[in-house]
Amino acid sequence: MNLKAIKNKIFNGKNPKFIYYIRAYVMTHIPRALLRPALSKLDSIVMIKK
């Protein structure tokens, strides 16, 4: 059996949903964590210019 046949047996010919769930979690949560310090800095710059 080759790798493609094994994958087809395990996932019944469907795409594995856990990959989509992991990707969606990363796309929604990681950018917020990385941009949070920059957001507070931008807020202080905007408040000064008003």
Image (cartoon, rainbow, N blue to C red):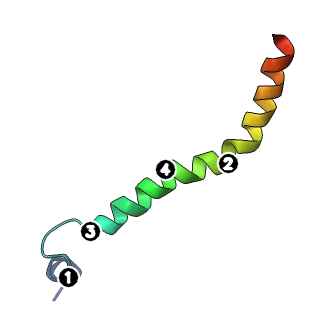
Residue at left offset 83%, top offset 26%: 44
Query: Cβ–Cβ below 8 Å for labels 1 and 4?
Result: no
Amino acid found under the numbered disc labelled 3: Pro
Amino acid found under the numbered disc labelled 2: Leu
Real-space Cα separation, disc 1 to disc 4, in angstroms: 27 Å
Real-space Cα separation, disc 3 to disc 4, in angstroms: 18 Å
> Which one is earlier in the sequence, the residue at label 2 or at label 4?
4
> Which one is earlier in the sequence, the residue at label 3 or at label 2?
3
Position in image of residue 22 (x %, y %): 42, 63
Real-space Cα separation, disc 3 to disc 2, in angstroms: 28 Å
Name the mark on residue 2. none
> Which one is earlier in the sequence, the residue at label 1 or at label 4?
1
Position in image of residue 17 (x %, y %): 28, 65
Judging from the image, what secondary structure is the residue with disc 2 in?
Answer: helix
Query: Cβ–Cβ below 8 Å for labels 3 and 1?
Result: no
Q: Is residue 27 left or right of residue 41?
A: left
Amino acid found under the numbered disc labelled 4: Met
The residue labelled by disc 2 is: 34
Residue at left offset 58%, top offset 53%: 30
Q: Nearer the viewer, residue 20 or 9?
A: 20
Query: Cβ–Cβ below 8 Å for labels 3 and 2?
Result: no
Label 4 packing within 10 angstroms: few (<14), some (14-19), many (20+): few
Judging from the image, what secondary structure is the residue with disc 3 in?
Answer: loop
Q: Can you say whether 10 is above or below 17 in the image?
A: below
Name the mark on residue 27. 4
Judging from the image, what secondary structure is the residue with disc 4 in?
Answer: helix
Amino acid found under the numbered disc labelled 1: Ile
The residue labelled by disc 3 is: 16
Q: Is residue 19 left or right of residue 33?
A: left
Residue 19 lies in what quarter of the image? bottom left
